[in-house]
C-alpha cells in the first residue's frame, strides 16, 4: 500500500507552515525506542528494506493533490512543493537483524525538513511492526533451542500486509517456514502447513480423512489429531502411518493442537515409536509463544517443531514499541525535547559496539566524533540523495546476523523473563551537548530533562 | 492487498485432497469468537464490507497458478479447479456495528467446500482486526462520555492497511475523526491533527513556533504545549491566543501530551479562561485508552477531546480475538468438533435478540427453526451466488447502530472493567442436535464435548 496520503494530517499542516516560513533546511530525525517493553532484554531491528522502498517511491499523485486542495486546508505554495516532491535525503541505519537497545537510533534521516517530516508516520509504522515481530520471533527461537518453528500468524495478523511483514520479520528472527503462500512466493521462505479440523469433519470419520490426505501427500502428511480426541487421533494416525509404510511411503508426523502438550507429546512419541514410526515427527500448535515453548522444552516434551501464530503476529505480551521519530538537528543546530520522561538525546548520532569477555558494550555518541577504542560503528549509510547505496541484503543474511548477535549477549540480557537490557554508555561529547542545550534554552526545567 | 496466494498453505493442500476425493459439495462454515477477551462484556462486529469485497474478487491469476505449479505440491486437477475458481457461495452475517457475544456467528459462509475452505484465512484476518478495534473504540467512546475522540493510531498500526482499517473500525466504534489523511479520503471521515514536538523544536523558541502555526491556521491551531515545559507552554499558547483574538481570529485549543493530565488540564483551563480564551479547548493525547479516559472523566478533568493512538490501534490490553471459522455442515449433514475447551456448535445457525426491561436476551439456534417469541433475527443474507445482495451501508449508519445497541445493554455488560458478558441462550433444537452428534459419533468423549 503506497499513497502520498498515507500519513498523519499534521505532517501536512506543519509542512505548510514550514513552507510559509521559508524553512526547508536540512533536518536530522532519529528513530529510536525510548523504553523496551516488559520482558525484552534486546530488540532485533527489522523493517528497513520496506522503509527504503517507501522513501524511493514517496510522492503525491495529481489525484491526491486534488484531494488535498479540496480540503481547503492548504495553500498553493504547499501544493506546488508537494507536486514536485520526492525524498531527496540520506538515511543511516542499523542493518536489519542487528540487535539493539533503548535510545539507540534504528535509523536517522537527514533531508529538507518538509520531506523528513512528511515521511515520519510510515517510517514509524513499518519499523515498529517488523522490529516487534522479529524480536518476538527471535525469543521463540531461543526458547525452541533448535526445534523447527513455523509462522502461522496470517489469519490473526492485522490485515494482509501485516501478515506479509510478520512472515518476513519472523524469518529474520529465525523462523524456518511460514504458512503464508504469498509470503513464500514474495520472500522465498519455505511454505508449510498441515490440515484443519474442518477437513477432518468433512469426512465421515477421522481415519477416512487421514487416508484421503495421506493418499494426496504420501510423503508429507502431518495429521491433525485433536478434532475429536487426541489419543484416539494419534492411534488413527499410527494406523494410517503403517499403511503408508506398507506401500513404501512414510508418515511425516502428527500435529497436536489442544490439550496438555507435555503429556500428549510423550504419548504421541510412544505410540508412534511402538508403531514402528520413529521417523514421524510430533508438531505442536495452538496458543504458543516463547514462554510456553520454553516451558515445554524445559520439561523435555518430545516435540520436534512448533507452529506459532496469534501470539507472534500481534506480539501479544508486548503489542507495541515505544518508538519515536525525533528532530535532533535543524540547519546544523542540535535540537532536543525536554518533556518529563520523554527527553531526547540531541544531534545526529552513532552507535558503537565492542565485544568483551562477558558479551558486548555499546556507546551512544555524536555521529561526527571519533570512535571509542576497539569499537565498530553500527549505523551505516543506506540511502543517499534518495537512492539506496546498495542492493537489499538476502533475508538469510539478516537471519544469520540476528543469530550471531544474540549468540554473544550475556544470559542476563538474553533471558526471556525479567532480563536486564543493555544500556548504552553515552559519550562525553553527547552528555556535554545535552547539558549545554538544557542549560541554554530552558534553565527552569534543567532539574528534570 | 488482494492475491489468491494470500492464504495458508493448508487451504490448498486440503483443497487438493477434496478435489482428488471428488468432495466439493456445499459446506457451511461459521465464524465466531469462542471466548471474549478479559474486560470485554461485548464485541462490536466490523470488517464485513472488506470480507465481501475480498470474496467478490477472489481468484487466482495465471502467474499465481504458475507459482503454485512450480512448488510441485499440486496436481493438474486442482490447478484446473483453481483456474476457473471464483467465490460462488452465499454469506449470512451480522451487519457491521452490531453488538454481539461469544459463540454468536459474526458470519456464516455456504459454498462448495473448496471455495469456502480457501477463503478462511482472510475472512478471519479481516473480521478479527476490525471487530477488535471497533470494540476498543466503542469502549473509549463510553469512557469519554460525549467528549471528542480522534484516531491517532496510524503510526503504530501494523502496516498501512492496518492503519486504514483501524480508522474505519474506530469510526464505527464512535470516533469522530482520524489523523490518517488517506482514510479521510477513502472513508469520508473527518481528518484532524495538531503539530509535533519536532515542529516546535525546529524554531528558535516555542512562541516563534506557535506564532508561525497560528499565522498559517488562524482559526484551527491546536498548540502542543509540552515540548519543554507544559505550564510554560500553556502560557505561551495563551499569549498567542490573545494575539489571534486581537486580530479577529481565535485559538482553537491546546494539546497536552505528557505529564499528569488531570492537574495539567485544570491549569490549562484556568490559564485559558483567565486569558479570556474561554472558547479554546483542551485536548489530551499520549498513552491514552478507555481506562485512562474513564479515570480522567471521573476525576472531572476539563478535557474536551482525546487523541487515542497506539493502545487503540493494537487493542493493547486485548490484542487478539479467539476467533475461529468452523465447519458446521457438509453436504446437508451437521458437523462439530469435540476437542476439549474448543467444542463447536453444529449446524447453520441464527441469532435472535429480544429487548427486555433490563436490556436484551439473545438466543443461538439453528437457521431453519422458528424464531423464539418476540425476537428479531440478527444474521441477514449479505451475499448470494458470490454477489452482494445490497450496496454497502454508509459508515455513519454502522456507527449509529453500534450506539443504539450499546445504549440498551445493562450496565453490568457494558462496564469497562470486569463486565459480565451476555451469554446467548441455546435453543432446544440446537442442544438436541449437539447431544445427538456427540452421542452418535464419539461416545468415548461424550463426557467433555
Image (spheres, coloured by chain):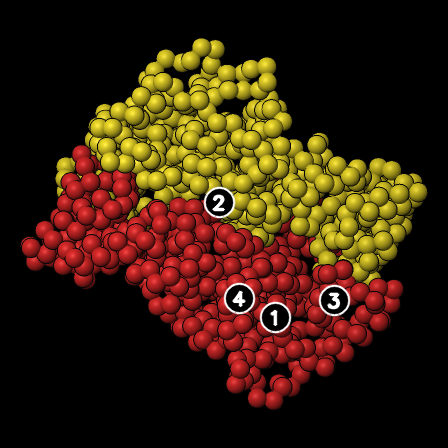
Chain colours: A yellow, B red
Query: Circle 4 is placed at which residue position?
Result: B43
Against B225, residue B282 (above or below) is below
| Mark 3 crowd level (few <14, some 14–19, many ≥20, 10 Å Cα) | many
Query: Circle 2 is placed at which residue position?
Result: A320
Observer-nearest residue: B267 or B323?
B267
The span from disc 1 to disc 3 (Cα, nearest Å) is 15 Å
Observer-nearest residue: B80 or B419?
B419
Q: Chain of mark 2?
A: A
| Mark 4 crowd level (few <14, some 14–19, many ≥20, 10 Å Cα) | many
The span from disc 2 to disc 4 (Cα, nearest Å) is 22 Å
Instruction: Kindly give the residue lying farthest to the bottom in the view shown.
Output: B373
Q: Nearer the viewer, mark 1 or mark 2?
A: 2
Identified at 18% across, 46% down, the residue is B236
Against A4, residue A209 (above or below) is below
The span from disc 3 to disc 4 (Cα, nearest Å) is 24 Å
Q: Nearer the viewer, mark 2 or mark 3?
A: 2
Query: Circle 3 is placed at which residue position?
Result: B336
Left-right relation of A72 to B298: left
Q: Nearer the viewer, mark 1 or mark 3?
A: 1
Q: Are marks 2 and 3 in contact (CB under 8 Å)?
A: no
Please check whether the numbered discs 2 and 4 fall on a single chain.
Answer: no
Q: Chain of mark 3?
A: B
Answer with the quarter of the image where residue A58 lies.
Answer: top left
Observer-nearest residue: A150 or B21?
A150
Observer-nearest residue: A62 or B259?
B259
Identified at 48% across, 45% down, the residue is A320
Q: Nearer the viewer, mark 3 or mark 4?
A: 4
Amino acid at each position: 500500500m503506497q499513497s502520498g496520503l498515507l500519513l498523519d494530517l499534521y505532517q501536512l499542516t506543519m509542512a505548510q507552515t514550514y513552507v510559509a516560513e521559508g524553512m526547508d533546511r536540512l533536518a536530522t530525525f532519529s528513530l529510536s525506542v525510548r523504553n523496551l517493553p516488559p520482558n525484552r532484554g534486546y530488540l532485533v531491528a527489522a523493517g528497513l528494506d520496506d522503509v527504503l522502498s517507501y522513501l524511493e517511491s514517496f510522492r503525491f499523485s495529481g489525484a491526491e493533490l486534488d484531494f488535498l486542495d479540496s480540503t481547503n486546508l492548504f495553500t498553493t505554495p504547499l501544493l506546488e512543493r508537494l507536486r514536485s516532491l520526492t525524498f531527496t535525503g540520506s538515511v543511516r541505519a542499523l542493518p536489519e537483524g542487528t540487535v539493539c537497545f533503548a535510545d539507540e537510533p534504528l535509523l536517522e534521516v537527514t533531508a529538507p525538513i518538509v520531506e523528513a517530516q512528511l515521511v515520519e508516520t510510515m517510517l514509524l509504522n513499518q519499523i515498529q511492526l517488523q522490529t516487534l515481530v522479529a524480536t518476538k520471533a527471535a525469543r521463540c527461537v531461543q526458547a525452541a533451542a533448535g526445534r523447527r518453528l513455523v509462522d502461522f500468524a496470517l489469519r490473526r495478523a492485522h490485515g494482509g500486509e501485516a501478515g506479509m511483514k510478520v512472515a518476513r520479520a519472523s524469518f529474520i528472527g529465525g523462523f524456518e517456514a511460514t504458512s503464508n503462500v504469498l509470503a513464500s512466493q514474495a520472500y522465498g521462505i519455505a511454505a508449510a502447513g498441515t490440515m484443519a479440523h474442518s477437513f477432518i469433519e468433512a469426512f465421515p470419520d477421522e481415519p477416512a480423512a487421514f487416508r484421503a490426505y495421506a493418499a494426496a501427500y504420501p510423503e508429507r502428511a502431518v495429521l491433525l489429531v485433536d478434532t475429536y480426541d487426541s489419543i484416539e487421533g494419534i492411534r488413527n494416525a499410527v494406523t494410517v502411518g503403517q499403511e503408508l509404510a506398507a506401500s513404501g511411503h512414510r508418515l511425516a508426523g502428527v500435529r497436536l493442537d489442544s490439550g496438555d502438550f507435555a503429556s500428549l507429546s510423550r504419548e504421541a512419541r510412544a505410540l508412534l515409536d511402538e508403531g514402528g514410526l520413529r521417523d514421524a515427527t510430533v508438531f505442536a500448535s495452538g496458543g504458543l509463544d516463547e514462554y510456553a515453548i520454553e516451558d515445554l522444552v524445559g520439561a523435555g516434551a518430545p516435540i520436534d517443531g512448533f507452529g506459532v501464530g496469534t501470539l507472534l503476529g500481534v506480539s501479544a505480551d508486548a503489542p507495541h514499541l515505544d518508538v519515536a521519530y525525533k528532530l535532533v538537528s535543524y540547519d546544523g543546530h542540535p535540537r532536543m525535547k525536554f518533556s518529563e520522561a520523554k527527553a531526547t538525546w540531541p544531534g545526529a548520532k552513532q552507535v558503537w559496539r565492542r565485544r568483551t569477555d562477558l558479551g558486548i558494550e555499546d556507546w551512544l555518541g555524536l555521529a561526527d566524533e571519533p570512535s571509542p577504542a576497539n569499537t565498530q560503528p553500527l549505523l551505516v549509510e543506506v540511502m543517499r540523495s534518495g537512492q539506496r547505496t546498495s542492493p537489499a541484503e538476502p533475508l538469510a543474511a539478516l537471519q544469520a546476523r540476528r543469530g550471531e548477535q544474540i549468540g554473544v549477549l550475556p544470559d542476563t540480557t538474553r533471558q526471556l523473563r525479567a532480563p536486564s537490557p543493555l544500556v548504552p554508555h553515552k559519550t562525553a561529547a553527547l552528555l556535554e551537548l545535552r547539558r549545554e542545550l538544557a542549560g541554554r534554552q530552558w534553565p527552569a526545567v534543567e532539574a528534570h530533562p
